[in-house]
Structure formats: structure tokens, C-alpha cells
Amino acid sequence: MTIKIQKEVWSILIVTGLLCVVCAVLGHAIRKSDPSKKPEGAANLGLIIVNFFNNLVNTNMGEEYVNFLSPVIGTIGMYILVANLIGLFAIPNPTANLSVTLTMAFFAWLVIEGTQIHVKGAKGFFGGLFEPFALFLPVNIMGELSPLLSLSMRLFGNIMVGGVLMQLVYTGCSLASGLIPFIGKFNFLGPIIAPVMHAYFDIFAGVIQMYIFIMLTTVLAKSKADS
Amino acid sequence: MDYRFLVPLGAALAVLTGFSTGLGQASVARQAVESVGKNPEATNQIRSTMIVGCAVAETCGIYGLLTAILLIFAF
């Protein structure tokens, strides 16, 4: 029996290892820095990252959720950002695999449901499934489960389609430059056309998708907990 | 008779949901541009609201893509 290893497995390991090293270095720098002075270098970068996620949770959900939810949201956001941007280094995007995006969406879903139970209490949460009357139970259960599908498929679809389109662009460029005699063997149209598409599909779409993911998680958690 | 040749056609029709999604997202962006022109001091709030609106409108197109992928890989 042979075990088929998907090509994204190695990039998942690379991204995870990279993030572990970066977080260890940043944490060491912050622990060593003097709180009474201005932060410098790596400690400054760490503070910027933490502040970004704290501000996002603060503006979308309110002051009381910052210590409770900001670490989870920050972990998800950092992993998705690095996983989207690593496609620039000729490593297959981990987020182009549905297992990875489904795992991320599962943790986001846990955040959404956990916030609801935290605010309403277990009785209020499970009683809310029978609103307005008992026949609505299947509809309400589908409504609770739908963020799992939509969050994971949005991220997966965007990143996977970006990769497929880049492959099409490279193939088309090599075909088009093959029409030219003598020098056609070298794909010289690719390096001219591809960087613009890389800037859009890898950098722009990657950053926007990460922002949308954590934004939707916080907004959904807040609106569902308040309703 | 083998009707497998209809699978790519069905996938292409499923991806056609992108048409309405594009129209909806364009209308979201147009309204956002108009409101930024009316009161520029609320730009940050308008931007974050617009991104959430775009993301929710995108869900429809994503479901079409999901259907197309399932059609191609399941048959």
C-alpha cells in the first residue's frame, strides 16, 4: 500500500515552522525589552502585530472581548496571511488545500459559537435554536453551520483560482513566445506579464482575503451574540 | 448512452453565478464611492463596511464555484 502525500503537506510544515521561529524570536525580543523605554527592532514589529489585531477586535466587537478573543483571531490571521503570501516563493499555497481552510474556518466557527454561549449562556443558546417556534430547528441548525462552509470555501476558492489562473498565464505566455522563431524556446513573455498578475492574485487577494476572514469572524460573532 | 459530456457544460453553467455576483459587488462599490464623496471623514468606517458587504455578496459566487468543482471531480 502506498500513501499519497499531497504537495501542500510540505508547505504546511514550512509555514508552521516559519511562524514558530518568528513568534519565538518576537516573544524573546518583547520579553527582553524595557517597558519604560521606546520599543525597538523586533519588539516593535511584535507590538504592531498585536496592536493591529487588538484594534480590529476592539472596533468590531468592543473593549470587553479584546483579552478574550484577540489571541485566537491573531493566530488565525497570521497563519492565513503567511500561507497566502508564501506562494510568491514558488511553494504551493497551503490555503489552496480545502483541509487547511476548513481547519481555519472550524476555529473561526468555534470562536463564533463560543462567544454566543459565553454571552447568552448555554440555556439561552440552545433555547434560541427553537425560535420563533420548534419547527424552525433544522433551519436554525443550518444557519449555525453555514459560516463553516462559506468561510472555508471563500478562502479556498480565491487562493486556488489564483494559482490555476497563474498556471494558465504561464502556459499561454510560453505558447505565445514559442510562435517566434529562433528565440522562442525561452519563455520571455512570462517575466513581463506575470508580475502584474502575481501582484494581484498573490499579494492583493491574499491580504484582502485574510482581512475579510478575521473581519467576518468578529462581525458574525458580535452580531450573532447580540441577536 | 454516456452523458458524461454534459458535466463540463453543467460546471460552466454553475460558474455563471459569477455574473450576478459581479453586478452585486459593483453596486456595493459604487455606493461606497458615492458615500465617500459625500462625507470623506467617514472613509475608514465605510471601507470596512464595504468589505464585509462585498464578502457576503461574494458567497453566492463561491457556492457556484463549489458546485462546479464538485461536478468536475465527483463525476
Image (tube, coloured by chain):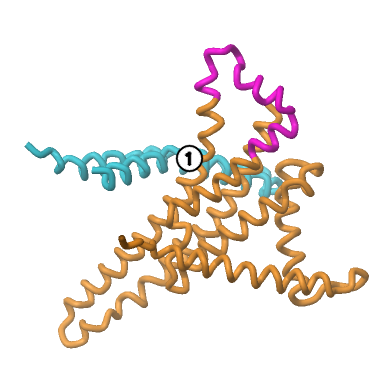
Chain colours: A orange, B cyan
Q: Position of residue A218 (x, y in %)?
A: 66, 43
Residue B45 in percent (x, y) is at: 68, 45
**Crowding at label 1, few (<14), some or many (≥20) Cα neighbours within 10 Å?**
some
Observer-nearest residue: A80 or B1?
B1
Image location of residue A113, percent across then percent down: 64, 36
**Residue A91 appears left or right of B7:** right
Residue most extreme to the front = A1
Task: Please name the predominant secondary structure of the magenta segment in the image.
Answer: helix
Location of residue B40 with respect to A27 vertically, above or below:
above
Q: Position of residue A118 (x, y in %)?
A: 74, 34
Snapshot quadrant of residue A175: bottom left
**Which residue is drawn at the image coordinates 71% and 53% (left, top)?**
A71
Residue lying at the far bottom of the rendered structure: A182
Which region is colored magenta? A112-140
Q: Residue at x 80, y 70 (%)?
A: A30
Q: Is residue A206 above or below residue B41?
A: below
Q: What residue is rendered at 56% in x and 58% in y?
A: A80
Res A59 → quadrant: top right
Kindly identify which residue carries mark 1: A149
Amino acid type, callout 1:
Leu
Residue furthest toward the right? A36
Q: Chain of mark 1?
A: A
Q: Element type at marker 1?
A: helix
Residue B2 located left or right of residue A193: left
